[in-house]
Image (tube, coloured by chain):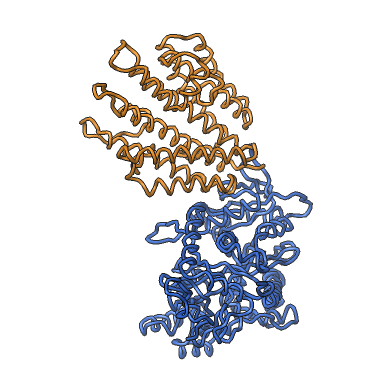
Amino acid sequence: MTTIGRDTRAHSPTEAALPGLLVQPGMWDELIAEDGRPRPAAAALVSHLSGMGLTELRERQDRADLDILAAGITFTVYSDGRGIDRSWPFDVIPRIIAAAEWRRVRRGLIQRLTALNRFIDDLYGEQRVIADGVFPAELLANSVNYLPQCRGVRPRFGVWAHICGSDLVRDADGTLYVLEDNLRIPSGVSYMLENRLVSKRVFGDLFRRQSILPVDDYPERLHRILCSLAPEGVSAPNVVVLTPGVYNSAYFEHSFLARRMGVPLVEGRDLVVDEHDRVFMRTLGGRERVDVVYRRVDDAFLDPEVFRPDSVLGVPGIMRAWRAGNVAIANAPGAGVADDKAVYAWVPDLIRYYLHEEPAIASVPTWRCLYPAERRHVIENIDRMVVKPANESGGYGLLIGDRATQEELDAAVAAIEADPRNWVAQPILSLSTTPTLTTDDIAPRHVDLRPFILSGDGHDVTNGGLTRVALRPGSLIVNSSQGGGSKDTWVVERTALG
Amino acid sequence: MTLLARVGEHLYWAARYLERAEGLARVMREHTFLLADMPTSVPLTWEPLLAIGGSAAFPGDGTPPTEAAIVRHLLGDPDNPDSIAEGATRARENLRACREVIPVEAWLVANDLHLYLDARRNEGIDRGSRARLLDRVIEDHQLFLGILLGNMSRDAAFTLMRLGRHIERVLLITRVLDVRAGQLLGPAEPARYDEVQWIGVLRSLSALHMYHRSSGVPVAAIPAMRFLILEATFPRSVAYCLTSITQTVSELPMAERLLAGCEDALEILEGLAGADDAESLHAGAVALGREVERIHDMVVAACFPESTPAG
């Protein structure tokens, strides 16, 4: 254990010093280098924190918690079939990324999304990638996220995944990996924006002293991308956000984005598709045409005429309207075929195939249980693997080999053998840490990062993204539904001015 | 600006619930003060407030309910849908479904009021802590309204909230008049301190000061009732609210039908212009309340055709 360059004993005991800015051996910390000194981009923050002391920092944390409670920044946890509205967990100490690194990441993410969108467009079109032997046909045949109903549809610009949230993690050697891509209805961006508002109130003084890249214009960028998707000839498109409703875990975000874009937040029952395959919303004054739907409803519930007939969240006929080109849907139905965790293993190949480039950002080596050799490798090394179901999200069903009991390992092996295609495995990465306020002091906690990538007539990547932090000591689970918290993420253009 | 019918209905109900909470808070606050002023010989009970404060059955066992039981019922009882805390919660739930429409600061106030009251479900039962709690309800709603007035475009969303507020306000005024006039009219009883009680009625509708400024006569039953029903310049009178209601419905879809539906209420009001006996005014207030409930039904049918019951 190394501490940073301040000997706390030298201070008077009445002044609460700032303990706990530590690096655990063998770990990469986002703020503190191995020698215990702050990384250059974090120097201003660390010096500020040290000057502030633990008591003051805790007061600011309390203030932030109060702000969040008062603002009703919530998410919903499901427990015993009941939804409970919880305040968004936020840690005041920001996570910092140097702008120079972020420029590289940004390039890598745009490259990745370009390839993924080409891939989806290809799968629902000519399927060249299969004919050329790059992607196995049986994988597509078994994919639960592939929707045959989308075959032949050509969304504008050939883009299917307009909004992507990719999860990045950093291993002990400092390498940043894409852990997964969320191409269906990724959430979290509103928390990224709210976190920034809260931290500007808490650390307003620091924002003046260095150049932290803004995130606040995301809704405008999103709105612009959504407008660009409108059917041809529509000059002032009506955009709406489609939510499953107030009981959805991400309702806060749906409402947030609708408000920040100034567009209606609709539920399925607010929309109606007429016999000419046109979509309307029921307004106070009657029906009004809808041109672009940013939907936050899963594919399966989107249209009871086509998918689950029991869905009351969806809009009967919206797939007809989409296929007829009368409405744009973002993300396009079926885009999820490319965020299947089994597909993940092919992404580097897809980048080479479609773009003739080497991946600019790494994927985690991934073993596919579909293949006997790889399956054997996974089973033999299961205590050193992270085993994931190929089609789940939210961290459910995840097994971390070196933390599992023998029983859990056995159960995982049985599950893999019962349904190999549904499982992939990766080596255990030692997720990087960042200093986090705990009940006692400041301690390193594991983090990931979810930037958001917009694709339409162009590309856009958020400056940083949503940093999620595993608040429990040693935990690697960052999901807010399972004890995770969040942090503001600062992409810092240059080091401290003073 | 596009407004979904469903969202419009949430806005309308949110405005009604908040207005209701403030109105009941004012009535309760004044009643508490009134009681403090009265000699113990005056049989002043809390039961009239049950009639003013809504329709929900008071869970009594036949014995006369205590002040504490009634106050708890009206203030924080989670089983009473018309209690102030429940009203704040319902307002907040409705607003939560239209956060993309109302100013953020207004949402913050409503959310904060809900959190504040929800954490104090059992407070305010004793007279000592009651005023502070009720003050908070009144002040927060006034703050909420101020934010709307100062920040919100005068669009359909604003109109529906204004409509809900004034419909709710008429219903409160007419209920207060019905209940209190029922008690205070009839044969004079000098020991009843009628004057003090009518002062209380005016004050509970935040009308005392404006009454004095405009009427120029001491407080008494007839001029007080006339003021609360007919004073068109006073925003907490039936006449003012009805004017506002007709203005707002004229901005809504199916305005003509809705305006026609307001005719009966306006006629009753006109008929009361010369009334100077307590019975006519009392009966007129009751009839006006009923008419405004009918206007509510028409608004729901015209504006929220897909409405699911319960609001």
Return the residue nearer the eye: A184 or A60: A60
Q: In this view, does B82 lie to the left or right of B9?
A: left
Return the residue nearer the eye: B199 or A144: B199
Which chain did the renderer colour blue?
Answer: A
Task: Please tell me which residue is depicted at 49% across the width and 90% down the height of the picture.
Answer: A376
Residue with the most extreme right position: A233
Residue A19 versus residue B288 in the image, above or below = below
Quadrant hosting residue A293: bottom right
Which chain did the renderer colour orange?
Answer: B
Q: How many labels does the image show?
A: 0
Q: Where is residue B126 in the image (x, y as percent from the top left)?
A: 30, 39
The reply to whether residue A115 is visible in this rendering is: no
Quadrant hosting residue B148: top right
Task: Please tell me which residue is depicted at 35% across the width and 14% down the height of the picture.
Answer: B185
The reply to whether residue B130 is visible in this rendering is: yes
Task: Please tell me which residue is depicted at 63% across the width and 45% down the height of the picture.
Answer: A281
